[in-house]
Image: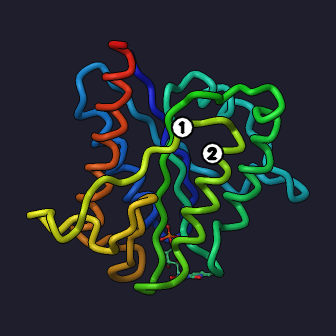
């Protein structure tokens, strides 16, 4: 069974909705099992993220998708605490060669979400992971997915407090499906 973890932080629920859509997309592939893992503030003690169980679950995954709301033009403080805690895996090279991808949401159309995606992409590179970009060309997509036009990852724009736009939801489903499909192909090599 191919395993993919979707690790995210969410305050009002929109990032969680995207994470769950990505998991649904992953699970749409036979032989793939996706799981959503929330970063909780309760696991941050004196500024440090501590959740060894989550790290062990992620160790067992073939791919990890990272998601954070865009807060002040970057990942949330809670997600950054998780990234810093993952530095244990950096030195141990624990996540090398796993597939990775990223998603974010902000309330503005150009609210600096790309910086969040770039931060996630650089994080994945530091970990030695393989980054999967979004391959939907918006002008060529009959369903209108990837409406923000970002290719590096999924950039969503908030519909209303906690609510995700339908097209962003479908882009998230697609992203999960693509990760699962690619992992299936790699398994056959
Ligand atoms: C502290 C804070 C900073 C934010 N900064 C940005 C920002 O820089 N750009 C943006 O587009 N939206 C920004 N937002 C809006 C959030 O990204 C948006 O509400 C998002 O959907 C929250 O995700 P959640 O529903 O998963 O908590 C900010 C919100 C908060 C509370």
Residue drawn at point x = 23 percent, y = 68 percent: 138
Q: CA distance from mark 2 to mark 1?
A: 7 Å
To which residue does mark 2 refer? 124
Quarter that holds the N terminus: top left
**Quarter of the picture for ligand 1?**
bottom right
Quarter that holds the C terminus: top left
Side of 72 relative to 131 (left or right):
right
**Residue 33 picture location, percent across and down:** 37, 27
To which residue does mark 1 refer? 130
Is 54 above or below relative to 80?
Answer: above
Residue drawn at point x = 39 percent, y = 61 percent: 151
Q: Secondary structure at mark 2?
A: helix
Please tell me how crowded label 1 is: few (under 14), some (14-19), or many (20+) other residues with Cα within 10 Å. Answer: some
Task: Name the residue furthest left.
Answer: 142
Q: Relative to the observer, which residue lies in front, 159 or 146?
A: 146
Please tell me how crowded label 2 is: few (under 14), some (14-19), or many (20+) other residues with Cα within 10 Å. Answer: many
Give yes or no for contact between labels 2 and 1 (Cβ–Cβ under 8 Å): yes
Q: Relative to the observer, which residue lies in front, 37 or 108?
A: 108
Residue drawn at point x = 26 percent, y = 58 percent: 136
């Amino acid at each position: 069974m191919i395993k993919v973890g979707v690790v995210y932080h969410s305050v009002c629920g929109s990032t969680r909705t995207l994470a769950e859509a990505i998991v649904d997309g992953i699970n749409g592939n036979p032989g793939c099992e996706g799981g959503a893992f929330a970063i909780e503030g309760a696991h941050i003690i004196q500024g440090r993220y501590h959740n060894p169980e989550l790290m062990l679950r992620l160790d067992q995954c073939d791919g990890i998708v990272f998601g954070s709301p865009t807060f002040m033009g970057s990942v949330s403080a809670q997600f950054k605490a998780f990234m810093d805690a993952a530095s244990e895996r950096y030195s141990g090279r624990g996540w090398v060669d796993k597939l990775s991808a990223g998603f974010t949401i902000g309330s503005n159309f150009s609210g600096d979400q790309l910086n969040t995606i770039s931060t996630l992409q650089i994080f994945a590179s530091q970990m030695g992971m393989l980054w999967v970009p979004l391959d939907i060309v918006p002008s060529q997509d009959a369903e209108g997915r990837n409406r923000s036009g970002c290719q590096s990852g999924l950039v969503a724009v908030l519909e209303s407090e906690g609510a995700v736009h339908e097209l962003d939801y479908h882009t998230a489903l697609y992203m999960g499906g693509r990760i699962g499909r690619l992992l299936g192909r790699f398994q056959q090599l």
